[in-house]
Structures are given as structure tokens and as C-alpha cells.
Image: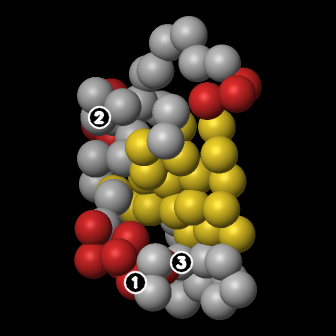
Amino acid sequence: MIKEFATEFSFLKAINEDAFTIHWFKNGNVLLKIKEEPFLFFHSEEKKGFSKSISKNGNYGNAWNENKYQEILK
């Protein structure tokens, strides 16, 4: 991740494999949690995912969008 798109969450250290949880929703959405905290999701109506590690939308994906995140939980 280049600094232009990085956030404080872009460089997490010492993450154990057990810290990751993936939730698959019937509507096609996917949520990744790290240590039980939402971190990344894919919304079925968007071409690119949304991540807390991305500061702005671009080739790497989309910055976190709380409204879209709330939609996947419906």
C-alpha cells in the first residue's frame, strides 16, 4: 500500500490467523473482521471492496463507508 492511500490500519503488526473472521451473507455481501472489529467488506452492488486500510477510493478499492457497511447487515 502506498502512503497516498494508507491509513493507520494499513500496517497492522503481529496479527494471528485466529484473529480473522469472515462472514458470508445470503445477499452476496462479505465482511472480514480482525479481532472482532469490522475491517473490510464487499458489497454485492459495488465493483470494489471497502476497507479501513484505504484512505480514499481508487485502484486499491474504496475507503470505508459506514452507510454501505450498515446495508450489508440488513
Q: Residue at x 53, y 46 (%)?
A: 33
Determine contact: label 1, label 3, CB under 8 Å. Answer: yes
Please identify the quadrant where the C terminus is shown. Answer: bottom left
Specify which label sits upstream in the sequence, 1 or 2. 2
Identity of the amino acid at label 2?
A: Thr
Residue at 64% across, 37% down: 20
Query: Label 3, label 2: how many angstroms apart (C-alpha)?
Result: 21 Å
Element type where label 2 sits in the image:
loop
Q: Verify CB contact (< 8 Å) between mark 3 and mark 2.
A: no
Residue wearing tag 2: 7
From the image, state whether disc 1 or disc 3 is nearer to you: 1
- Name the disc covering residue 16, or none: none
Marks 1,2: beta carbons within 8 A: no
- When the figure is inspected, residue 48 is found, relative to residue 55, above or below; the finding is below
Label 1 sits on a secondary structure element that is helix
Give me the residue at 65% from left, 46% from top.
21
> Residue 15 in the image: x percent, y percent?
58, 18
The residue that disc 3 covers is 43
Q: Quadrant of residue 48?
A: bottom right
- At label 1, the amino acid type is Glu
Residue at 27% in and 77% down: 67
Q: Residue 38 placed where, x, y %?
A: 44, 51
Secondary-structure class at tag 3: loop
The image quarter in which residue 63 lies: bottom left
Q: Nearer the viewer, residue 25 or 39?
A: 25
The earlier-in-sequence mark between 1 and 3 is: 3
* Coloring scheme used: secondary structure
**Which residue bears the numbered disc 1?**
71
